[in-house]
Image (cartoon, grey):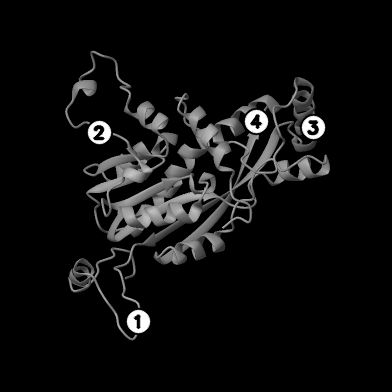
Amino acid sequence: MPAVAPDAPAVRRWLDRQARLNQTPWLHEEVARRMAERLSVIRAEPAAVLDWWGHQGGSSQPLARAYPAARRIVVVPTPALQRHEAAPRAAWWSPRRWAAGAAPAPVLEDDVAPASAQLLWANMMLHAAPDAPRTMAAWRRALGIDGFLMFSCFGPDTLSELRAMYAALGWPPPAIPFADMHDVGDALVHAGFADPVMDQEHLTLTWSTAQALLAELRMLGSNTHPARFAGLRTPRWHARLADELTRRLAGADSRLRMTFEVIYGHAFNPAPRPRVAGRTEVSLDDMRTMVKTPRQRGAAGE
């Protein structure tokens, strides 16, 4: 995982800000669509899907198309986001607002029941988690045996142009360093997941102005690097930032360009295995799990 972890208080402030927004970043929607194309590796039909940090949006429609009969449970990291997601979105006269069981209430990360879903979907959130290993451990607890994990996150080439610009100007880092896909795969194995498969692609986004670029970046996240600028920046500094972005990032067509590396991954939650020792103790529940019928992963080619 990254050598520099996100600063937890900064992540919390960013999440609090998200609780006041009702707009989904375009990139989250696009990555969710591309991630959904990879669901063909799953043969089993999940009865319940955990949408981890689903408050960020972009995943409800792809999941509904892939699994129309499954319960989608949104998992959120803060009580403020839980209240935001639970608030009625339809007008008071709409039948959707009063329909019983239309959608389960959002659940806090720490309140997710063990083995409560057969698919855990985490779109564009792992890079923002303050403690990625803890998040992966929570994922494994939440999945049933042979449950399927599907996720996406930023890779190390994300914002490479912005990082180079900040370094050239002698400014602190504009974002944390994002983990390489091989490191993410190793962390999954360490967390107990089996057969992780990793992939990545590079996307180039363009904007007409520096102001539009900065507005998009604010929606995508926040600078949670512990060594970031201390305190707020002045209007004069923001004006210089816009000028530098325009001068350094504009292409021949005058549009500003920025690179985003997106990592995709999936893995299985295997049955527990007892440690080999002179004396091995296995709980009754684990024993029952291990003696059930052979695992049916549902992945293509298995």
User: Which circle's residue, 2 or 4, is located before the other in the chain?
Assistant: 2
Q: Of 129 and 96, which appears nearest the observer?
A: 129
The reply to whether callout 2 and callout 1 are in contact (CB within 8 Å) is no
Query: Is residue 57 visible to us here?
Result: no
User: Which circle's residue, 3 or 2, is located before the other in the chain?
Assistant: 2
Mark 3 sits on what residue?
244
Please state which of the two labelled residues, at mark 1 or mark 4, is closer to the viewer: 1
Q: What is the CA distance from the residue labelled 2 to the residue labelled 1?
A: 44 Å
Q: What is the CA distance from the residue labelled 3 to the residue labelled 2?
A: 46 Å
Mark 1 sits on what residue?
276
Mark 3 residue crowding within 10 angstroms, few (<14) / some (14–19) / many (20+): some
Label 3: which secondary element: helix
Q: What is the CA distance from the residue labelled 1 to the residue labelled 4?
A: 54 Å
Left or right of 261, for residue 54: left
Please state which of the two labelled residues, at mark 2 or mark 4, is closer to the viewer: 2
Q: Give the residue at x 51% y 65%.
A: 186
